[in-house]
Image: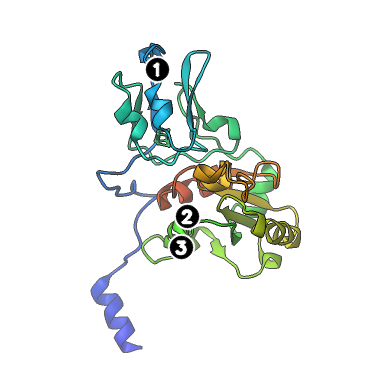
Amino acid sequence: MFKALKARFIQGYRTGKFPTHAPPVLPDRFRGLPRISPEKCSGSCGAPCGDVCPSGALFLENGKPVLDLGRCIFCGKCAKACGDGVVEFTDSYRMGAMKRETLLLRGQDFPLEVQENPDVKRLFGNSLKIRQVSTGGCGACELDFNVLNTLAWDMGRFGIQVVASPRHADCLLVTGPVTEHMLLALEKTYAAVPKPSLVIACGACAISGGIYASHPETRGGLEGILPVDLYVPGCPPHPATLLEAMLRLMGRK
Ligand code: SF4
């Protein structure tokens, strides 16, 4: 015990100040919220940006580019392919959305939606117990969600905790494109969560299927399977993106 107290004395308080007192420290290579500039797009270049996109996230609609954040894996190929600078990546990590259509970027400002349901704020504003379900994910979203449990991020200080049983959970956090093998397990897990409950689609796969969307062994994400309350884009989402979005879902921001 004295060893532990001594270590604490020497090391001090190690939990970061994000999000209450400081922005997160992000690496230079971090690709955040894309910015689309439709006015720069002539539409006559043959759309190489759409051709290089591995997930079909970038497409033309009435001759103008649309970027679906829910499908984007943030590879950056479109920005390199477009000589007119139609797609740029900002360093903004705030990308969570409560409506699917919010993720369709057409050049508008990205709205940071706030929780408007008073019942959600009352029930989950100070305590959110999460059961995580990996429906065929590669492990990246799961790993970066685990990061929020480390002392550097300590999501427990906001009342967010991971629980082992869906019967103890308020919320399902789903990763992966929903494979046929995991569909029944997902549905049973959701049925076991006491209602009312919340569902978070974490990462491009859970939102839309990501790069596996067209694979016959996947359902292409949660659409049409579970009602989603929060979409968190990324491949995987940065821990700061996920935590900031969860706090807005709880009505804490
Ligand atoms: S960054 Fe997103 S939109 Fe651009 S090519 Fe990659 S997946 Fe497609």
Q: Residue at x 47, y 55 (%)?
A: 141
For marks 3 and 1, give the CA distance.
42 Å
Asked if residue 2 lies left or right of residue 214, the reply is left
- The residue type indicated by label 3 comes to Asn
Q: 217 or 129: nearer the eye?
A: 217
Q: Are marks 2 and 3 in contact (CB under 8 Å)?
A: no
Vertical arrangement, residue 202 with respect to residue 70, above or below = below
Q: Position of residue 168 (x, y in %)?
A: 68, 67
Which numbered tag is attached to residue 46? 1
How far across and down, in percent of the image, does residue 175 sit?
A: 55, 54
Determine the image quadrant of residue 148.
Answer: bottom left
State the residue position of label 3.
146
Toward the viewer: 236 or 153? 236
Q: Does dot 1 land on a helix, a strand or a loop? A: loop
Residue where numbered disc 2 is placed: 141
The residue nearer to you, when weighing 11 against 36, is 36
Say few, some or many: other residues with alpha carbon within 10 Å of mark 2 (under 14 / 14 to 19 / 20 or more): many
Q: Nearer the viewer, mark 3 or mark 1?
A: 1
Q: In the rendering, at what x and y percent does residue 58 appear?
A: 46, 28
Q: Secondary structure at mark 2?
A: helix
**Residue lying furthest front:** 216
Q: Is the shortest distance between ligand 1 and the CB of mark 3 under 8 Å?
A: no
The picture quadrant for ligand 1 comes to top left
Disc 2 residue type (three-letter) = Cys
- Mark 2: C-beta under 8 Å from nearest atom of ligand 1: no
Residue 20 visible (yes or no): yes
Residue 253 visible to the viewer: no
